[in-house]
Image (cartoon, grey):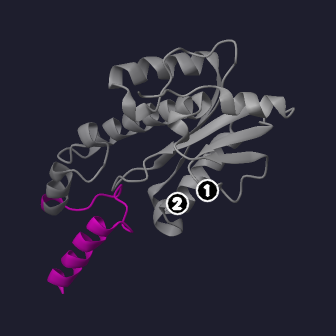
Amino acid sequence: MTSTPDFSFEEAAFARGLIYVAGVDEVGRGPLCGPVVAAAVRLDPLRIPPGLNDSKKLTQARREALAAEIMARADVAVAEASVEEIDRLNILQASHLAMCRAVAGLAQAPDHVLVDGNRLPRDLALSAEAVVKGDARSQSIAAASIVAKVWRDRIMVDLAQQHPGYGWERNAGYPTKDHLEALRNLGVTPHHRRSFKPVHHILYQDQTISR
């Protein structure tokens, strides 16, 4: 039996006297290129869109429809950390940076934040709790995962038009067979994360050959 996210983490926070509770999640740790994107969502308990779930368990069409509903019914903020920031900080710290930016972008500062994962961003200077596999357990985090996924996929479709051949409109920058093959044949773009091994190895090989 598969379970779906519920509102119990949020209700537990309400019971402690916390009123404005938001969920935050990021998308894009694994890709070889493009930004990491985070979304923060504070759901209205009386207007929760039905069918919220971990974005990975939904079809693209369902994600798109739910993202539009979430944007219309909830307080939502989306933020990014750039490829340059990923390479400078590392992907975990860049993910946390994007999360902090998303939370700061909400129309009203939350009293409490539910963060997907097992670690809290160190710069998140407010009440928060880490929820392991939160996108499958908390409706607020699930909503954030959906918005972040749809947002980032659109970025990658735009970048794919600027850099055809890598299949970003299909693979969203993840290291699929066609992406890795294109990386070897077409080379590294300005949007590739140079600190990631497959990209770093190709750059290193090119430098070695050209010497």
The tag earlier along the polypeptide, 2 or 1, is 2
Asked if labels 1 and 2 touch by Cβ distance under 8 angstroms, the answer is yes
Residue located at (68% from left, 38% from top): 105
User: Relative to 55, is 100 above or below?
Assistant: below
Residue 119: assigned label? 1
Type of amino acid at the residue the image marks with label 2: Leu
Q: Is residue 192 magenta?
A: yes
Residues packed near mark 1 inside 10 Å, few (<14), some (14 to 19) or many (20 plus): few
Mark toward the viewer: 2 or 1 = 1
| Res. 34 in view | yes
Location of the C terminus (image quadrant): bottom left
Mark 2 → mark 1, Cα distance in angstroms: 10 Å
Span of residues in magenta: 185-211
Q: Position of residue 182 (x, y in %)?
A: 16, 54
* Residue 207 appears left or right of 153: left
Q: Secondary structure at mark 1?
A: loop
Residue located at (61% from left, 56% from top): 119
Q: Label 2, on which residue?
A: 92
Residue located at (56% from left, 61% from top): 93
* Residue 193 appears left or right of 23: left
